[in-house]
Amino acid sequence: MTNLQKLNQSIQSQVPSVDKLLRQDAVVELMEIYGRQTTTTAVRALISETRSEIKENGQKALEKLSVQNLSLLLKNWLEQYSSPSLKLVYNLTGTVLHTNLGRAPLPEEAIEAMVNVARGASNIEFDLSTGKRGDRDNHIENIICELTGAEAATVVNNNAAAVLLVLNTLSNRKEVPVSRGELIEIGGSFRVPDIIKRAGAKLVEVGTTNRTHLRDYEDAIGSKTGLLMKVHTSNYTIQGFTHEVAGKELARLAKAHDLPLIEDLGSGTLVDLTKYGLPYEPTARETLSNGVDIVTSSGDKLLGGPQAGLIIGRKDLITAVKKNPMKRATRVDKVTIAALSAVLQLYRDPDRLSERVPTLRLLTKPENEIRKTATSLIGPLSKALGQTFSVSIISCKSQIGSGSLPVERLNSAGLSIKPDGQRKGTALNNLLKAFRGLPVPVIGRIQDDALILDLRCLDDVIGFEKQLIKLDL
Ligand SMILES: *Cc1c(COP(=O)(O)O)cnc(C)c1O
């Protein structure tokens, strides 16, 4: 054994035992909060860390386990270990409905409704007037019909499930003609051809990428056709020499052949967005009035509600959808129904919608208001970042996101943070990491070697500013 190994061994022998540490007052206190098992795990982890550090740093590593340090280190470890991995972040990416950041923030009314129903038993499937078994759709069906003019409606886990369920119910083992211009992929594995296949149907591609005519659909209809389908190309546009068959025209064709026409609207707003100064997007009501039999859309995109898939339209078809055993496999829980119901209530008062539904409020936030936030934050941010970064107020463009209105951009304002001096790439990466490491992580976007914080979605300016001192660069 070399001298060094001997020294190492002698230091290792000074490491206190798990039992000894567990008996210390500070550790006993922590055990009352976190429990014996978790605290023991923490002590073991700390001991094992210390042992490896002894190999590098020798005697000094033992300081970790000193009475002064032990309590704080264990507390930090335990706090991190027991904090949930899913948490709130500041979405300063400039994409309002960011799928990876959880899409729509919910209105207070919806949050209250969720908390309320989560706490105890509820009449989710119990009819209080008759005392008999009820249907969970009863809590939202009437209001969806009222807001869209539909005969019937049902709700499932998300829009992907809605499309899958409708296709499986109405065209299992049958053919579904879809325009080649509408064979969309939404980020994260929703692809129309795959969904059709998984629903048990057979895709029949009609027309071309840029032009599809009514006769293309006519030619594709045969004895095996189950339904006609239109898909709202929500995340791209085809421009130039183009032609698509309008819902109205396609509805006439479908009717003549006694086939249902379904349309996947994607974002699916319930109100005319142009009234709020936003770009045009078809509403469910308008689409149904064109003669489309079933419309599917998301609950957490432009609607501004919880994750859900709305299936809206003809009563006999919705009844068939509800009877499909896959409905049970894709159903929503009481918390979602509570939230959705609360959000839909807000749609009864369109005049106050843009104040009360956060998604609409954020989308319609005027640029000058966002700029005010930027002006108030540039000082504190520059101070927190120190000399090696330059911060400036910029004009930028936000986007709606989640495949909604892909081309339209909203005028916004933000802060641009650029590293000065050497090794800009490394500095920028460290900066991103530091922002992600904050108690409420801050997520921005990179553009031209700068970190851009689009302030459109920053409501909690005070909270944001307060935690800047914790920025660990
Ligand atoms: C977003 C979208 C979907 C998928 O909806 P989810 O709610 O994410 O499941 C399907 N179709 C279109 C057109 C969409 O825009």
Image (tube, helix red, strand yellow):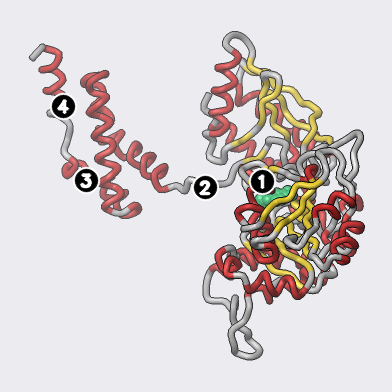
Helix, strand, or loop for circle 1? Answer: strand
Q: Of marks 1 and 3, which one's residue comes earlier in the chain?
A: 3
Q: Of marks 4 and 1, which one's residue comes earlier in the chain?
A: 4
| Amino acid at pointer 1 | Arg
Q: Which labelled disc corresponds to residue 335?
A: none
Helix, strand, or loop for circle 3? Answer: helix
Provide residue 446's location: percent of width, then percent of height: 66, 26
The answer to whether one can see residue 351 in this image is no
Kindly report the distance in space between the C-alpha atoms of the residues bearing marks 2 and 3.
30 Å
Q: Which residue is mark 2?
A: 86
The image shows residue 305, relative to residue 190, as above or below, that is below
The answer to whether one can see residue 442 in this image is yes
Say which of marks 2 and 3 sits in front.
2
Provide residue 426's location: percent of width, then percent of height: 55, 17
Provide residue 73's location: percent of width, then percent of height: 34, 36
Q: Of marks 2 and 1, which one's residue comes earlier in the chain?
A: 2
